[in-house]
Image (cartoon, grey):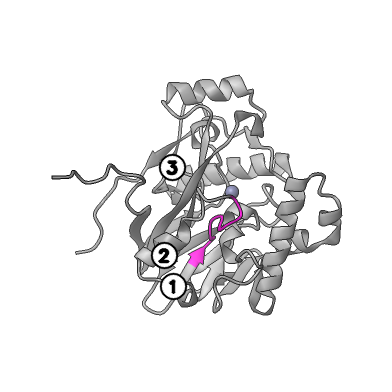
Amino acid sequence: MTKPARPGRQAPGVYHRTVGDFSVSALNDGMFEAAFAWLTNITPDEAARLHDTTFRAVPPRITISSFLVQTDERLTLIDTGCGTSMGPALGGLARNLRLLGIEPPDVDTVLATHLHPDHIGGMVDRDGKAVFPNAELVVHAADAQFWGDDATLAGAGNDQDRGFVELARATLAAYRDRTRLLTKGDGVRGISIVPEPGHTPGHSGWLISSGKESLLIWGDIVHMPGVQFSRPGAGMGFDIDGAAAIATRQRIMDMAAADRLAVAGMHLDFPCFGHVTRAQEGYAFVPEVWTPFGP
Ligand SMILES: [Zn+2]
C-alpha cells in the first residue's frame, strides 16, 4: 500500500477570530528571505544574535499576511499581499480566499495600510487590471498623494524603487473610479483609520471596534518581530522617513501596551494576533493562544 505523500506545504494559512460583531481572518500570503542589512540603527551582527537566541531563522525571513473582515453584509480585505509582484513563493491570498469560498468579485472593500508591493500587489494582475472588480479601494490621502506624485517617480533612484512607485501608480489607476481617500478620524463602517506616518507618508493602521472589543491591524509597525519588539529603535531601510517611523513604532507599541490593546500585523508571525507588553529591553509580543473557531 502506498503511503500518503509527505507534506509539500502547510494546510491553509488561515486563522479566524472575532472582534465583537466582526469576524477577522488572517490569510497568509507567503514568506521571503530578507537580510539583516535592511535594518537601520542596529548592526547585522546584533540582529543575527537576537535571532539566534530566539531560535529564529538566519538569514531572517519576512512573512506576509492580509486580513479579511466579515459581517453578514460586507467582505472587507485589509491589504492584499504580493499577488504576482514578488514571485511564485508569494501571492497565497487568492488561494486562501478560495478555500473560504470567496471569489475576488465578492470583495466589497479593500482597506490599504499603505501602497507597498507586499500589501497591494494582489490588487492588480500582470496586465494592470483590477483583481477585485467590485471593490472600493480605501487608503490614507497622504499615501495616494505621495505615490501619485511625479516627483516621487522622478526621485526613484534604482529599478526596485521605480518598481514600487510604478505598482502603486498602476493600482491607483486600476481603481481610479472607486478610490476613497481618508485622513485622521475617518472610518469605514466600524473600522477607523489610525495614521502611523513614517514607513510611508500615509502608512496607517486600521482599528476595528465593536462592543467592548477592539483590534488594531497595524500594518508595518514591525517587519522583523525577532528584532523590533526588543529594539523598537531599529528601523527598516524602506522607511520613507526613518525617524518618523521609529517615533511612530514607539508611540503605537506604548499605546498598545498601556491599553492592553489586541494587535495584528502583516509581518507578525502567523497567525499574527497578540498583545504588546513592556519588557526589560523595549517591548515583547505575546502571541494569542490558538483557539478553535465556531460552535
Ligand atoms: Zn510590508
Say whether residue 141 is visible. no
Q: Which residue is mark 2?
A: 97
Q: Which residue is mark 3?
A: 269
Q: Is residue 242 magenta?
A: no
Residues in magenta, as a range? 77-86
The numbered mark, 2 or 3, whose residue comes first in the sequence reads 2
Q: Which quadrant is the C terminus positioned in?
A: bottom left
- Residue type at mark 1 is Glu
The furthest residue to the left: 1
CA separation in Å, label 1 and label 3: 26 Å
Closer to the eye: label 2 or 3:
2
- Residue type at mark 2 is Leu
Label 2 with label 1: CB-CB less than 8 Å: yes
When asked about the image quadrant of residue 242, the answer is top right
- Give neighbour class at mark 2: few <14, some 14-19, many 20+ (Cα, 10 Å): some
Q: Which residue is mark 1?
A: 103
Residue lying at 61% horizontally and 24% vertically, measured from the top left:
44
Residue at disc 1, secondary structure: loop
Rendered location of residue 244, percent (x, y)? 70, 44
